[in-house]
Image: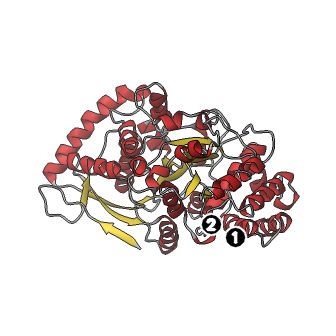
């Protein structure tokens, strides 16, 4: 189901939310472009005033998933300040947004502002010719200077920018645990704890004896299994393994790393460690079950407070983190999945005026003020490199939980895209099915590898 909403300005009974043009560089943009920002901001204010006086309005549309509370309030404040742009929003759930975007692009009815996932969906939209080149806007607003190189490159095709990251799924390769149970059962866990998979599975006996289940992981929607696969890859290989599997330099059915990872997935699925009903439970419901004390551990990215009623306040116990159990005794990480989760792009069929309006709005979401509003909703690391540097400098206070060793050890590692978007769409869909089968114990790691390899071979 989708929700279409219109925000009415305080002094008008319009049915569309009015957005204004932003400066070529807002005051929150990078220091390198602050001089240009001052000049362009004055020009923008004049344009806004003239547009308000003359009634000139550029109307655009945007399809998004639901913004967070402060994020949405920030958009509304912008619309009051700059009324020369009207933006009509349509909100979808994540999977439906992808489906409806694909249909609309094929039908020529796509909105001005698109919100693709970085990776396979962005690749598909680029191949369809649906994305506007954003190089000129990047130079105008200073997006490259505020971006992580890997993320900027992932949003680019053939050397040009086609999307701007909205958010990150945060650091994974982490388990969150219930400190109350840890103390009661004498498990001795700390944020520095690094267990092998076998050592982790051995905790089941003590947890079960106390009436607790071990790990909240739900595979109804399948994608968490693919994310878990990506984290396990980063325990034994660098992100180059992902590039090699995509290019064909390494095949799924001829890779020791693939078999190691698939074997670990099966071992975990068959160990009795997963929450009862994991096969038919979605990710959000098992996170909520952890917050309710049903399980000891939760597997999620740093965005997990968004998935739980009342966020941090909805968890009635002290929370700490520890490393995701490792495949073998070498517990060092070779890479990390800290990447753009979703992004904003502009429809290539839009008029120049519509593209200008869309780029202005995108900058408003990506600049430092926009990141600050997202940070108010979720005090975690962002996709804006400059803002993260301010976090590290102490200008913004991140939760102590996210300062723990589990995250600090990942920060300087090579980055890969989230595994559920890192491959061709058909390969991802096959991985979702086969990983579920692996963890259910219905196929062998070798059979799963052969099945994914066959799908990949059809693309060559």
Question: Which residue is found at the position 80% from the left and 69% from the top?
Answer: 451
Left or right, 417 with respect to 348, comes to: right
Question: Which residue is found at the position 54% from the left and 49% from the top?
Answer: 169
Query: How far across and down, in percent of the image, does residue 350 sit?
Result: 41, 60
Residue in the foreground of this view, choosing between 431 and 150: 431
The answer to whether the residues at label 2 and label 1 have Cβ atoms under 8 Å apart is yes
- Element on which disc 1 rests: helix
- The residue to which callout 1 is attached is 433
Query: How far across and down, in percent of the image, does residue 135 sit?
Result: 50, 44
Q: Residues within 10 Å of mark 2 (few under 14, many from 20)?
A: many
- The residue to which callout 2 is attached is 222
User: The C terminus lies in which quarter of the figure?
Assistant: bottom right
Q: Taking the image as drawn, is residue 245 in sight?
A: yes
- Element on which disc 2 rests: loop
Left or right, 16 with respect to 119, comes to: left
Mark 2 or mark 1: name the one nearer the start of the chain.
2
Residue in the foreground of this view, choosing between 173 and 80: 173
Q: Taking the image as drawn, is residue 171 in sight?
A: no
User: The N terminus lies in which quarter of the figure?
Assistant: bottom left
- Residue that lies at the very extreme toward the left in this rendered image: 11
Query: How far across and down, in percent of the image, does residue 373 sit?
Result: 35, 43
Say if 112 sits above or below 203 in the image: below
State which quadrant residue 49 falls in: top left
């Amino acid at each position: 189901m989708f929700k279409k909403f219109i925000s009415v300005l305080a002094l008008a009974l319009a049915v569309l939310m009015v957005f204004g043009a932003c400066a070529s560089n807002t005051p929150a943009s990078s220091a390198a472009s602050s001089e240009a920002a001052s000049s362009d901001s004055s020009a923008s204010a004049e344009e806004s005033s003239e547009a308000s006086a003359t009634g000139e309005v550029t109307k655009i549309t945007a399809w998004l998933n639901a913004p967070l509370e402060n994020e949405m309030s920030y958009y509304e404040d912008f619309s009051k300040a700059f009324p020369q742009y009207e933006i009509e929003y349509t909100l979808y759930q994540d999977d439906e947004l992808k489906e409806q975007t694909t249909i609309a692009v094929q039908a020529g009815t796509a909105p001005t502002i698109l919100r693709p996932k970085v990776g396979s969906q962005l690749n598909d939209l680029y191949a369809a010719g649906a994305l506007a080149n954003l190089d000129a806007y990047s130079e105008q607003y200073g997006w490259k200077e505020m971006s992580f190189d890997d993320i900027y490159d992932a949003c680019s095709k053939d050397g040009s920018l086609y999307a701007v990251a909205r958010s990150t799924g945060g650091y994974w390769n982490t388990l969150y645990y219930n400190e109350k149970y840890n103390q009661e059962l004498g498990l001795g866990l700390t944020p520095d704890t690094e267990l092998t998979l076998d050592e982790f599975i051995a905790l089941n006996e003590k947890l079960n004896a106390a009436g607790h289940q071990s790990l909240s992981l739900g595979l109804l929607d399948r994608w968490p299994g693919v994310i878990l696969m990506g984290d396990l890859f980063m325990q034994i290989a660098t992100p180059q393994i992902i590039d090699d599997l995509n290019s064909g330099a390494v095949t799924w059915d001829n890779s020791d790393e693939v078999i190691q990872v698939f074997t670990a997935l099966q071992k975990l699925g068959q160990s009795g460690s997963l929450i009862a009903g994991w096969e038919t439970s979605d990710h959000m419901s098992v996170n909520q079950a952890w917050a309710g004390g049903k399980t000891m551990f939760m597997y999620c990215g740093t965005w997990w407070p968004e998935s739980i009623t009342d966020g941090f306040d909805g968890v009635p116990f002290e929370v700490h983190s520890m490393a995701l159990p490792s495949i073998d005794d070498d517990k060092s990480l070779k890479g990390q999945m800290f990447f753009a989760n979703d992004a904003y792009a502009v429809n290539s069929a839009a008029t120049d005026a519509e593209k200008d309006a869309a780029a202005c709005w995108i900058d408003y979401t990506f600049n430092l003020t926009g990141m600050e509003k997202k940070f108010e909703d979720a005090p975690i690391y962002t996709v804006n490199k400059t803002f993260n540097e301010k976090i590290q400098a102490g200008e913004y206070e991140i939760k102590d939980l996210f300062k723990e060793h589990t995250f600090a050890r990942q920060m300087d590692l090579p980055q890969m895209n989230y595994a559920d978007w890192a491959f061709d769409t058909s390969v991802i869909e096959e991985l979702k099915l086969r990983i579920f089968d692996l963890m259910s114990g219905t196929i062998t790691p070798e059979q799963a590898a052969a099945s994914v390899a066959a799908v990949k071979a059809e693309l060559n």
